[in-house]
Amino acid sequence: MKQGFYGILPFALGAAAYGFAFGILAAQSGYPWWGVALMSFSVHAGSSQIVAVERFGMDGLVIGAALAGIALNLRYLGIIASLSAILKDIPLWQKLVAIHITGDENWALTMARHAQDPRIGAAFLIGSGLTLMTSWTTSTALGALLGQSMPDLASYGLGFAFTAAFIAMARAMWRGRRNIAPWAVTFAATILLINLGVESAYAILLGSLAGMAVAALLCWQARTGETP
């Protein structure tokens, strides 16, 4: 578990930077600091929180914000499924804790380390998740606490911190030329749907499903050597 605590620190510092930015923007959208902290602890999904806050700011409807966040969080069904082998030998309560504190960063790091050393497993995932969750919750709450007395930082382009963070995560997950087709399809489908007026959270979800379909097709072709 100690390996996970320390191994995720560079990612946790990056998450804290855009978590602080998120906290400021959430506070300036009307969220109290304790509400931001509670959301970060209970939801613990940066991209979904960002989308939910943006959606709430558009029409003030909690249900719309919740549905947008849930739609974007559906990707975690695939993430958790990929961890089944790592989590299979631990008690149920530890599995539930591990699932809750799993984020994009510690999932990617755990899978990469596990591929190098099969002994890296649930303890690493939990340790890195606890570090990441603490960093995220603390930084978002601090950003929200200070954001109420700060100028409108969105006008200074602070929102790009989120985009930059996701670009960095995407770069870390790049696995070579085999990613080109699925990523290109995901990007093109998402942009097309947004231009057609589809809500951004649902456009991202549908674009991701299109990319996953292409990836599955390519894997099938590689295994069988056939063209459907």
Image (spheres, rainbow, N blue to C red):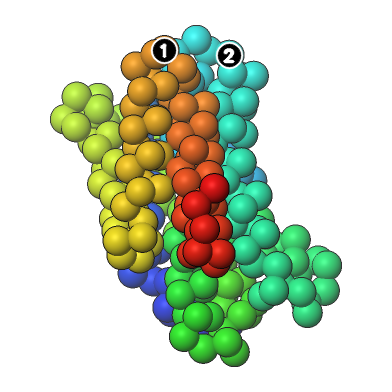
Q: In this view, does 180 lie above or below 191?
A: below
Q: What residue type is labelled 1?
A: Gly
Q: Position of residue 124 (x, y in %)?
A: 56, 78
The residue pinned by badge 1 equals 197
Q: Can residue 219 be seen in this view?
A: no
Residue 61 tag number: 2
Query: Mark 2 or 1, which is nearer the eye?
Result: 1
Q: Residue furthest right?
A: 92
Where's residue 177, x and y in %?
A: 30, 61
Residue drawn at (52%, 27%) of the image: 202
Residue 95 sits in quarter: bottom right
Q: Residue 13 vs residue 72: left or right?
A: left
- x, y percent for residue 221: 50, 58
Task: Classify 10 Å Cα crowding around label 1: few (below 14), some (14-19), many (20 and above).
Answer: few
Residues 226 and 105: in front is 226
Residue at horizontal 32 percent and vertical 52 percent from the top: 180
Q: Which amino acid does label 2 sit on?
A: Leu
Give x and y (percent) for residue 109.
Answer: 45, 71
Q: Is residue 5 above or below residue 53?
A: below
